[in-house]
Image (cartoon, helix red, strand yellow):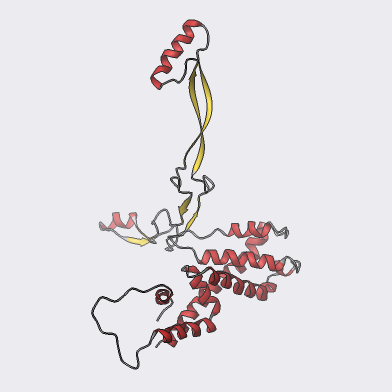
Amino acid sequence: MSLESTVKYHYAKTQNFSGMAPATSPDTLTGTDYIAAMGFAMSNAPLGYHAFMGKVGISENDAQNAVSLLTKYALENCDKVAALRKLDTDIKPLVMQRLAIYAYMDYCQSASTKKPCQCCEATGFIEVEKFTMKSAFGAVRPEQVTSIRRLDSKLGCNVGREVREVFKALCHECKGKGVVSSACLDCKGRGKVADRKETLKQGVPVIGECKRCVGRGFERVPSTEAFRAIEELETGLTLATWKKSIKPFYDQLITKIEIEESWANTSLAKATI
């Protein structure tokens, strides 16, 4: 049994219409046995179990517990980095918490993840400036613009005038939704694309790994966003210090979640053999 198969136990089940009789062997695991196995995996690898359950959307409490456990791990190991060791004792927990939050966000990224559109600031609309012709006689249709200009030249005065107005239009990036997909623009979330050079060389379609997303199929959370989040705390850390010493520690937090998830998956598999 894997972590992916535990998701169905958190949702309501439908009645079985296949006509097959349930297994009556004494060695068959029951629902209670599966729940006990989940508890065993949670006790052995709490960070990995809570992180996965929060990732698949079982509950927000699991996501909060995962961030809390990751923050605790970061506080226990942050003194290994000189730049983080020099932080004040009242700012250090806040910095570790924000690093844990962004590390967990990066861990939860997938091709189906939605993110706010930066073009329209998640509103779905953008402001567009247009020049419209206004007439002293009322509204003007597009075919009347030429006749109004002829009348202006004939009378020697401005019967019509061009006015600069601001209109709201649908955002061309999100199409009015306010959010955009995190899927890779080249492979569309598949992680595989056609290799044009090899295809022309061999004469048959050759599928290779997407070079833009390195086979992930989605865009990762930029590490500079985590730096801006801790920069708001007025820590005095520079971008050069972030790239040199703090970013490897930030990547270590992401790797820690993935290792703990793998350990939780192994513990669950051992409990359900």
Q: Is residue 102 left or right of residue 147?
A: right
Q: Residue at x 52, y 81 (%)?
A: 42
- Is residue 259 in sight in this rendering? no
The residue sitting at the front extreme is 15
Q: Is residue 117 left or right of residue 233?
A: left
Q: Is residue 186 left or right of residue 22?
A: right
Give x and y (percent) for residue 53.
49, 72
Residue 142, located in which quarter of the rendered image? top left
Q: Quadrant of the N terminus?
A: bottom left
Q: Which residue is at the front of the view, 171 or 106?
A: 171
The residue sitting at the bottom extreme is 26
Give x and y (percent) for residue 58.
47, 70
Q: Residue at x 40, y 74 (%)?
A: 8
Give x and y (percent) for residue 212.
44, 57
The residue sitting at the top extreme is 155
Question: Looking at the image, is 266 positioned above or below residue 225?
Answer: below
Question: Looking at the image, is 92 positioned above or below residue 144?
Answer: below
Give x and y (percent) for residue 18.
24, 77
Question: Looking at the image, is 272 positioned above or below residue 259?
Answer: below
- Is residue 154 in sight in this rendering? yes
Q: Residue at x 54, y 47 (%)?
A: 121
Q: Quadrant of the C terminus?
A: bottom left
Q: Which residue is at the front of the view, 269 or 144?
A: 144
State how many labels appear: 0
Q: Which residue is at the front of the view, 232 or 202?
A: 232
Residue 104, located in which quarter of the rendered image? bottom right
Q: Residue at x 64, y 63 (%)?
A: 244
